[in-house]
Image (cartoon, rainbow, N blue to C red):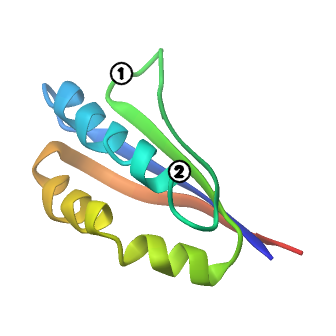
Amino acid sequence: MTITKRVTFIAKEGSEAKMKELLSAMVVPSKAEEGCIFYEIFQYENNPRKFMAVETWENEAALNGHKASAHYAIYKSSFEPYCDKKYSDELEVLG
């Protein structure tokens, strides 16, 4: 079963560039992970403080592997000073 997540981030005022840098740094290494089907970061044109990460994984094991990666640990330890709000819009499991 594939898992698709959409996670929204609202950057703090003036932190848009740093938030974009941190989130964008996740794309290439995440796409290289086993089980990654799709991984992209989008920045809203009408609200440059708002970003959405969309990721699809082959299964829960692949998603868990992603969460155990070194680049995920760097992101987790770095984003909070630049982020006003973070929330998951949806978690889909498709058969």
| Few, some or many residues within 10 Å of mark 1 (<14, 14–19, 20+) | some
Q: Secondary structure at mark 2?
A: helix
At horizontal 15% and vertical 43% (from top left) the residue drawn is 82
Q: Is residue 1 left or right of residue 53?
A: right
Checking the image for residue 31, the label placed there is: 2
Pointer 2 or 1: first along the chain: 2
At horizontal 51% and vertical 62% (from top left) the residue drawn is 33
Checking the image for residue 48, the label placed there is: 1
Please tell me which residue lies in front, 31 or 93.
31
In front: label 2 or label 1: 2
Checking the image for residue 90, the label placed there is: none
Q: Quadrant of the N terminus?
A: bottom right
Q: Is residue 90 left or right of residue 22?
A: right
Please tell me which residue lies in front, 16 or 71.
71
Task: Name the residue at the top extreme.
Answer: 45
Q: Position of residue 20 (x, y in %)?
A: 29, 32
Total marks drawn?
2
Q: Position of residue 5 (x, y in %)?
A: 60, 60
Q: Amino acid at mark 1?
A: Pro
Quarter of the figure with residue 4: bottom right
| Few, some or many residues within 10 Å of mark 2 (<14, 14–19, 20+) | some
